[in-house]
Amino acid sequence: QDTIDNGDGTKTWIWQLNHRVPTYLASVAVGDYVLYEDEYMGLEDTVPVQIYTRPSEASKVEGSFTHLKQILEWFETRFGAYPFGRVGYTGTAIGAMEHATNIAYPHFAINGGTSYESLLTHELSHMWFGDRVTFSSAEDMWLNEGWATFCEIYYLEELYSYDQYLSTMRTEHREVLRKTHI
């Protein structure tokens, strides 16, 4: 909503989320970040895209997020309009997490290429499966993760080829059959 210059080289950011979300989806990231801004022309509205990275990764954002708008469009045509008022990613030291409107995304994945595009897609799909609609108990976490895993593979057909989608799906299926019972 606002940014306040504190007069001492620091700023205070004021945020408001106008959607109810489970508490595990709320997050705050603090650090020396550079902001990359863009817009996505969604089905129902223009959605701001904000990606916060360390200064050393700023030049790598466009290469790492080159297909973000195509993936958003792909999701919207299949699952409905983007459910939040902002698409955000913030570079973090470890791991990835689908925080509503502000996905925690590991620094190593902002490398200037698309080698972590499936992770980008997985976390973004949680805006529909996990953030907008979520489970009622921890035992149902598979619903969020199952849909996100499916989405991270299914988008391959749209962006690349049916053969790549099918090959990746078969590999994942083989791993599930090999390991799930253990």
Image: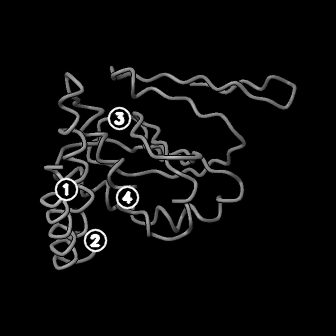
Task: Determine the residue positioned at 39% across, 35% down.
Answer: 85
Residue 181 lies left or right of residue 99; in this view the side is left
Q: Which secondary structure, mark 2?
A: helix
Q: Quadrant of the N terminus?
A: top right
Q: Which secondary structure, mark 3?
A: loop
Tell me if label 1 and label 4 are in contact, CB under 8 Å.
no
Mark 4 → mark 2, Cα distance in angstroms: 11 Å
Q: Which secondary structure, mark 1?
A: helix
According to the picture, the residue beneath numbered tag 2 turns out to be 159
In front: label 2 or label 3:
2
Residue 178 lies left or right of residue 132; in this view the side is left
Residue 169 drawn at (x, y percent)? 17, 66
Tell me if label 4 and label 3 are in contact, CB under 8 Å.
no
Tell me if label 2 and label 3 are in contact, CB under 8 Å.
no
Q: Earlier in the sequence, mark 2 or mark 1?
A: 2
Identity of the amino acid at label 4? Lys
Task: Determine the residue positioned at 25% across, 43% down.
Answer: 145
Q: Residues within 10 Å of mark 3 (few under 14, many from 20)?
A: some
Check the image and report above or below for 10 versus 114: above
Q: Which mark is residue 84?
A: 3
Using the rendered view, name the quadrant where residue 154 is placed: bottom left
Q: Earlier in the sequence, mark 2 or mark 3?
A: 3
Mark 1 → mark 3, Cα distance in angstroms: 36 Å
Residue 171 drawn at (x, y percent)? 20, 69
Q: Residues within 10 Å of mark 1 (few under 14, many from 20)?
A: few
